């Protein structure tokens, strides 16, 4: 269930009777919520694409630049897209909606910079409602550099990331990425009505949302949609890429869960488009047990992934747009550890084909079962009551998809003198179990100033959150994190090939560090990108 679905009641609770904000999209009056205590306004649930049902199910999104009604009530979040283990009342197939937080008392001539956020959670769950950007927008106002925040829902699981031979043959792979692009196109059409500048859009996301956003940077068309980005713990090679037929069984599992399509042997897409929504939701629940089944997929010429990202970037970055890119210290401290299955697990994770015995042995040599060297890093011999080998596995699970890919991404940019900044997030939350360290996703609450909702009490955490928002807002406005506004903070150096430095984001030790930790291990991983499908 979504913890942050409490955002809207919060906004309503602090609502003071006043005229509701209104803007026009075409002939439609869009009515939002005024939040005078935060000097901002909220608009939610605005459709950016036609409902992906019927013939539009399992099809590219159809852009919808205006709601098409006389009045549209934008005082609530749009429902989340279909996913497993969430109450059906919170879900809808008609989920392709956008939300906007903006400062109060602005007009279409204000031309404020825009931050476009794409949520994460493994391409199969969550929604835009899980991020409350009101504190970030409020801080941007208070520091004299106001910004507008925008976030979308996109299709998840088998509806957003179809797999199998038929979807491949019909060009229906990676629909979630197409949804993201449609959301950005909607911004180009409409953000001026909210007081934003379509030429000052910074895209960003965490985890899956960052993977999607970095993927757009593999294609020149992104320069028509954004001018910069903030990438948090997700890069094109973070998610191992395969051909669509590798997950044929997972697609068949989805199909078998849709009652009216269980016995279909050909043209399954047509059957699925004619099925009712409740049956489709049953199929989604039936299909998503495999965490990696539905996500980005190699899609051939003219696709998002005509080849592995490492191959696409072999001659340097595709676009010269500035960005911030970072990772968390312990981005994947998996606890699913069985000592005798480490080698087998490595082989299966990147299969087919299975990792060679040489690669597996090299990894196990570089990542020995020595707790002091494992993840969570910098925790010495502490194993938190778990088998010590879990730290070995967690180190591999952090470095292969995250550390190596973040370093590769920033080094490629630095080699071409792209204006890039790197960070190393090194402070967890009080609510995170100690065996998870500075876990994947911990940085999101800091980025948006929502630590209080997590019952955080550490003063250094709140200081770091304020610093991070200042860095990020500065970058969104000026394309540099160093505008000198807001809280006093260290100068963040540009990541350069002869000065590969990261900003260590830790409230008790905010400083720059050299990007050379675990150099031998990361160098080996990046030498084997084909084996890891990166």
Image: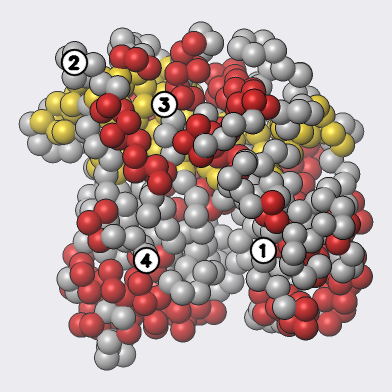
Element carrying mark 3: helix
What residue is rendered at 30% in x and 22% in y?
14
Tell me if I can see residue 451 in this picture.
Answer: yes
Comes first in the chain, label 3 or label 1:
3
Relative to 202, residue 404 above or below: below
> Residue 134 bears which disc, if any?
3
Residue receiving disc 1:
334
Comes first in the chain, label 3 or label 4:
4
Comes first in the chain, label 2 or label 1:
2
What residue is rendered at 28% in x and 69% in y?
281
Q: Residues within 10 Å of mark 3 (few under 14, many from 20)?
A: many
Relative to 9, residue 288 above or below: below
Comes first in the chain, label 4 or label 1:
4
Please state the horizontal and vertical placement of residue 100, each as a whole percent of the image: 34, 30
Element carrying mark 4: loop
Residue receiving disc 4:
84
Q: Quadrant of residue 417?
A: top right
Comes first in the chain, label 2 or label 4:
2
Q: Nearer the viewer, mark 3 or mark 2?
A: 2
Element carrying mark 2: loop
Q: Nearer the viewer, residue 14 or 116?
A: 14
Please state the horizontal and vertical placement of residue 498, each as a whole percent of the image: 89, 33
Please state the horizontal and vertical placement of residue 268, each as a whole percent of the image: 29, 80
What residue is rendered at 70% in x and 56% in y?
435
Q: Residues within 10 Å of mark 2 (few under 14, many from 20)?
A: few
> Residue 17 bears which disc, if any?
2
């Amino acid at each position: 269930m979504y913890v942050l679905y409490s955002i809207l009641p919060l906004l309503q609770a602090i609502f003071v009777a006043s005229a509701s904000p209104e803007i026009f999209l075409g002939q439609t009056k869009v009515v939002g919520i005024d939040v005078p205590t935060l000097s901002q306004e909220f608009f939610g649930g605005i459709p950016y694409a036609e409902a992906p049902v019927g013939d539009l199910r399992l099809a590219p999104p159809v852009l919808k630049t205006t709601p098409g009604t006389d009045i549209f009530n934008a005082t609530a979040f749009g429902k989340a897209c279909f996913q497993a283990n969430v109450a059906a009342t919170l879900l809808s197939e008609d989920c392709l909606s956008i939300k906007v937080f903006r400062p109060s008392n602005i007009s279409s001539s204000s031309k404020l910079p825009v931050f476009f956020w794409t949520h994460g959670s493994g391409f199969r769950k969550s929604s835009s409602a899980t991020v409350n950007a009101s504190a970030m927008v409020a801080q941007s106002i208070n520091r004299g550099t106001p910004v507008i925040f925008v976030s979308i829902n996109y299709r998840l699981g088998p509806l957003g990331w179809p797999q199998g031979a038929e979807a491949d043959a019909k060009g229906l792979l990676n629909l979630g990425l197409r949804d993201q692009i449609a959301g950005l196109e909607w911004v180009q059409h409409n953000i001026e009505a909210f007081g934003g500048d379509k030429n000052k859009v910074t895209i960003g996301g965490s985890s899956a949302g960052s993977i999607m956003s970095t993927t757009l940077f593999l294609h020149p068309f992104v320069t028509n949609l954004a001018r910069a980005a903030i990438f948090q713990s997700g890069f094109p090679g973070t998610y191992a890429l395969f051909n669509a037929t590798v997950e044929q069984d997972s697609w068949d599992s989805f199909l078998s869960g849709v009652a009216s399509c269980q016995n279909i042997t050909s043209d399954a897409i047509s059957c699925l488009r004619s099925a009712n929504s409740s049956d489709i939701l049953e199929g989604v629940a039936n299909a998503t047990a495999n965490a990696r089944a539905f996500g980005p997929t190699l899609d051939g010429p003219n696709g998002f992934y005509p080849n592995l990202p490492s191959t696409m970037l072999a001659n340097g970055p595709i676009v010269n747009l500035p960005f911030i890119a970072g990772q968390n210290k312990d981005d994947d401290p998996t606890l699913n550890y069985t000592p005798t299955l480490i080698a087998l697990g490595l082989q299966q994770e990147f299969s087919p084909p299975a990792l060679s015995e040489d690669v597996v042995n090299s990894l196990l040599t570089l990542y020995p079962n020595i707790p002091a060297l494992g993840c969570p890093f910098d925790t010495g011999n502490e194993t938190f009551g778990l088998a010590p080998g879990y730290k070995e596995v967690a180190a591999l699970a952090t470095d292969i998809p995250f550390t190596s890919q973040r370093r590769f991404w920033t080094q490629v940019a630095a080699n071409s003198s792209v204006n890039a900044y790197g960070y190393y997030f090194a402070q967890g939350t009080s609510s995170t179990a100690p065996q998870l360290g500075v876990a994947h996703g911990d940085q999101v609450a800091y980025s948006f100033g929502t630590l209080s909702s997590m019952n955080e009490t550490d003063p250094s955490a709140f200081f770091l959150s304020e610093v991070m928002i200042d860095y990020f807002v500065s970058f969104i406005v000026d394309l540099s994190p160093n505008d000198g506004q807001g809280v006093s903070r260290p100068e963040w150096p540009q990541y350069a090939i002869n000065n590969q430095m990261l900003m260590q984001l830790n409230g008790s030790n905010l400083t720059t560090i050299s990007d050379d930790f675990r150099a031998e291990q990361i160098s080996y991983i990046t030498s084997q990108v084909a084996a890891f499908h990166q």
